[in-house]
Image: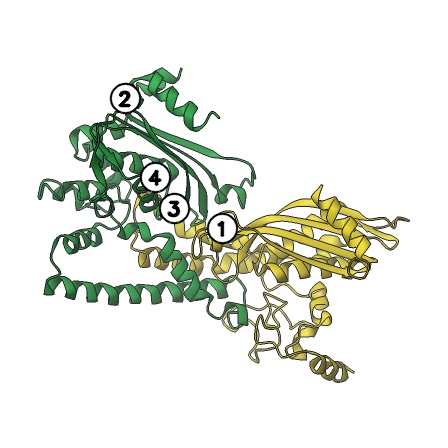
Chain colours: A green, B yellow
Amino acid sequence: MLDEARHRPRASHRLLKTNRIPPAETTDRTAHHGGQTQVYPAASFIQSKPRARMEFHYAKEMNGTVPTVTKLSKCIESKHSDSCKEEKDLKEAADSTKLFCIEKAYSTILSELGENTEREGLLRTPLRAAKAMQFFTKGYKETTQAILNDAIFNENHDEMVIVKDIDLFSLCEHHLVPFFGKAHIAYLPNKKVVGLSKLARIVEIFSRRLQVQERLTKQIATAISEALEPAGVAVVIEAVHMCMVMRGVQKMNAKTVTSVMLGTFQNDHRTREEFLSLTLGE
Amino acid sequence: MEHSKQTQYSSNEKKDTGDGGSVLNGHFDGMVKRPAGGTVRASAPQPLGAECGSHRSAASVMESWREERTRSVEDNEMSLPSLAAAYTTILRGLGEDPQRQGLLKTPWRAATAMQFFTKGYQEKIIDVLNDAIFDEDHDEMVIVKDIDMFSMCEHHLVPIFGRVHIGYLPNKRVLGLSKLARIVEIYSRRLQVQERLTKQIAVAITEALQPTGVGVVIEATHMCMVMRGVQKMNSKTVTSTMLGVFREDPKTRDEFLTLIRS
């Protein structure tokens, strides 16, 4: 039964091949904006600079605003020219304004919840909460290319490489409440291997955002696929969602498991079974 | 009479600049002169303890038993739009696009969720316990352990979760067992500090039953330590409050601690 399920065409697989946004997805997005047409800049950028293509492809998946990423990637490529420094200063000023806005929002939240914002324990809470929230969403500012550039090595190895039990913390985008768990990643190298901690860093980039577990899994798999062009990638995430545990249906022990299988992991059920038994089936 | 009590307490108290006297989270604890919830609705006539200046004496903690609610169900509905607006600001400030499909209703969901996480402000102990205190000729230890607890860190607004173990030695009066869990719920569903939470639970049970002794142990994981900051995944914080014979008699305390561990 697993085999039939696996042979259904996967959106992620399509993305791998075409490296463009499939028309269906774009329409889907615009349809949901109640009449407002949102044009995602990423679509037009993809045809421009080829080197930056990976970046902007990720941008579509980035579930955040694109322009920040564009500026950052320019900063990395340039040699710290004056315009780059100016941009950095502007960015820092913008960041502290944003922090202030978030801080004020948290003050409002505290008083609307019925708390006394002047009591000692809550005096600096808006600032702390704002900084904490910025930390929990720091993945928006990071790019895969920036962290992976140095750590891809040519190695004549084509057996499965697995990094499992990577602790993962993310924020549910629907309730702004944490979900956390473990990620297990495997890939079949095709002449290129990556530093092992970089797999964990990729998980960090995509998990430190407002996320949906399904999308998170796909983004991790796609990022590794794009960076290494391996024969196959598999990502499994099992997580506990506080929005289900602390509120709503309040089921303490429920776990959510999502997986994405690309390449050989998708086509060959024996490879997949080997991966699953090595990671999950102790 | 009130004033003489006040001077007695303030002379006994060491001046604490640390955690402050805010045992009554959700109320101003007497340290602030302006009326409670200046921006906010109707609510609470000040509880008795609040007038007595800053103190952490047992008396002010005991007052929590009689405290008024700071929030009502109507308040919840009225504050929902401004909470949602605040969350929209936060989303924008973080660089997200609040108009994208996954985030369209997030401000409302997050606001409702946060109100749920702080629903302890809407509840009073006295409402929960009134019917379930029974006269029973039982004076052996009663323990309810492994009560799942979820709270919010008042410093970072990030969840705390763990388990609470409660034991008490009845003095002719016993409490419905689920009411112990309900007391935990009332105090944990607030912006809390684990130390204060432990004490509030212990004091509430003491006030309700006047038992010979009460012991409360909480072990919890703080997401503010796990997800950010020092990022220690496996760390747990354990706090305990022992009142009455649990504090005075080491053997009783040992029995309680052994039974909750087994």
Q: Residue at 53% across / 45% down in the picture?
A: A247
**Element at label 2:** helix
Q: Which residue is mark 3?
A: A173
In the picture, residue A53 is in which quadrant? top left
Q: Do marks 2 and 3 both belong to one polypeptide chain?
A: yes
Q: Which residue is mark 1?
A: B113
Q: Amino acid at mark 1?
A: Ala
The N terminus of chain A - image quarter: top left
Could you tell whether B142 is left or right of A47 in the image? right
Per the model, the C-alpha gap separating discs 4 and 1 is 22 Å
Mark 2 residue crowding within 10 angstroms, few (<14) / some (14–19) / many (20+) = some
Q: Which mark is residue B36?
A: none
Q: Which residue is mark 4?
A: A216
Per the model, the C-alpha gap separating discs 4 and 2 is 21 Å
Per the model, the C-alpha gap separating discs 4 and 3 is 11 Å
Relative to A67, say whether B21 is above or below.
below
**Element at label 4:** helix
